[in-house]
Image (cartoon, coloured by chain):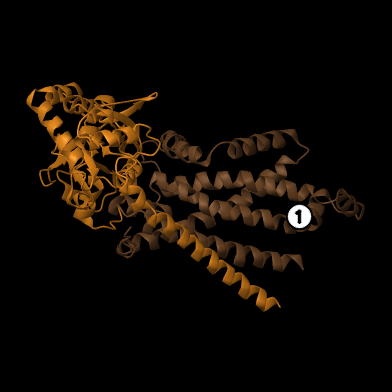
Chain colours: A brown, B orange
Amino acid sequence: MDWNWYVVWEYREWFYRGIMYTILLTSVAISLGTVMGLFIGLAKISKIKILRIPAAIYVEVFRGTPLFVQIFLFHFAVIPSFWETFFPGSPAPQPLFTGFVALTLNAAAYIAEIFRAGIQSIDPGQMEAARSLGMTNRMAMRLIIIPQAFVRMLPPLGNEFITLLKDSSLLAAISVTDLAYAGINVAKSTFERYPPYLTIAAIYLIMTLFLSRVVVRGLEKRYTR
Amino acid sequence: MKKNGWNRNWLLMIVALLSFTLLAAGCGTSQPEAGNQQNTGAGNEQANTGDTNNQSGEGTAEKTYVVGTDAIYPPFEKMEADKISGFDIDVINAIAEAAGMKIEIKHTGWDPLFDGIEKGTVDLGISAITITDDRKQKYDFTEPYFEANQLIMVAEDSPVTKLADLKGMTIGVQGGTTGAIAVKKAFGDTYEGLREYEDTPSAVDDFFNGRVQAVVADNGVLSLYTKTAAGKKFKLLKDDSFEKEYYGIMVKKGNSELLEKLNQGLKTIQDNGKLEEIHKQYFVQ
């Protein structure tokens, strides 16, 4: 089987652009998803029912349905009809925007669970001790519980970030020009399958290795001492 | 100790990467062997008897040819529950009948169809496949059975009259199709405004959503929307600068025996008017 690796070089601009888009998508989804996830996670363990129930439903729905379906629903149905209602006549936002929305909302559901589990893993005695020192519930949360929980959350968070990076490849189906899009469409245009697919697989691998070895391990080193 | 640990980790990673590549390479090299056993589709129980019959020269009707198609391209082919129907399907059935061949139609998907023909798990492909020079280097085609041309879908009030006018606009296409090839030819392989979708209906959906300003695709598919999306504001443009395209039935390179049978069957249904009859059934005009 003769593989023509030259096609990868020929379409190098697509791969460069793909890498940029994949990094952009993943970093936005990671940062926004983490912020959203924190609030949803806190809402899920809140004593207030009107916070707890919607948060629980949110997590179940986004965690329990395929990301693939969520992407298509948001891209072709939810966002266009939303746009038509609030900004009539203006074109629906570009796939990149839909991609951000779908990926972030999905990530938030998983991250919320990581936060919830992290917080609940801290011995209740910590809260009691903080409260008996005169801290308010919110202060105790911010100064005592969350910092400890954060350390325990780092490994599962790192895992989630890696999953997210790879899941962003599903957005190629709605023509987000990410790394997967480059691989798939080069394969389709040139009839060379292995070189483009192997190339993107290797690049994804390098990116996930960077994420786990440098980013997550760096954070773990910093916060576990 | 720390430093050592790091080095070893990196080494491990490189080894992992290499073995991954080698593994894939291994899969790649094993393919020609599979491909050599022509026509023995995996899991095709009749393949053996078919082969022996072929050697004795007669009884070719015994062999069941596996027909691959990407059944998400109406009106050429689509899935109806567990049945595949469409223009191409009617054509291949008519050809098979005329040539006395036994066929089994399978929904393989577009990429696996090309791959399957190379490997020999699929004997022939009919899936609105345009005969192109690039494809002819890797596969063999029958005589054309359908003439296609690209159409441009734009807004009703758009000043666009031809492909060249689309420069600077966002254009939706189905990835890997001749529509995509035509746009790349006109504006460059890495044209910023090009959006390649999994299928043409997705591109058209995004046209109606205002995300792309034009769609370039085959007449057979785009003209369907004049019926199904009559309320929407769009027009279809014909540009004579597009090269005429012809759909052919694809077989493995060098499989002249099958090619001959198909061509003979095709000629029969062309001559007896059956092909035209099927055409009229699907394309009014």
**Disc 1 chain ID:** A
Q: Is residue A112 above or below residue B185?
A: above
Closer-to-camera residue (B69/A28): B69
Where is residue B125? Give x, y as percent: 26, 38
* Side of B164 relative to A173 (left or right): left
Where is residue B188? Give x, y as percent: 23, 58
Which kind of residue does numbered mark 1 sit on? Ala
Assign the N terminus of chain A to one quadrant of the image: bottom left
Where is residue A40? Give x, y as percent: 67, 43
Closer-to-camera residue (B194/A6): A6
Residue in view at x 90 percent, y 53 percent: A129
* Whether residue B247 can be seen here: no
Which image quarter: residue B40?
Answer: top left
Q: Which residue sits furthest right?
A: A132
Q: Is residue A87 above or below residue B95?
A: below
Assign the C terminus of chain A to one quadrant of the image: bottom right
Residue in view at x 41 percent, y 35 percent: A84
* Side of A84 relative to A166 (left or right): left
* Side of B91 relative to B22 (left or right): left
Which image quarter: residue B177?
Answer: top left
Q: Which residue sits furthest front?
A: B56
Closer-to-camera residue (A191/B260): B260
Where is residue A83? Give x, y as percent: 43, 38
* Side of B36 relative to B152 (left or right): right
Label 1: which residue?
A149
Q: Is residue B80 above or below residue B144?
A: above
Closer-to-camera residue (B187/B174): B174
Q: Which residue sits furthest left?
A: B271
- How many marks overall? 1
* Whether residue B52 can be seen here: yes
Per the image, label 1 sits on a secondary structure element best described as helix
- Disc 1: CA contacts within 10 A as few (<14), some (14-19) or many (>=20): many
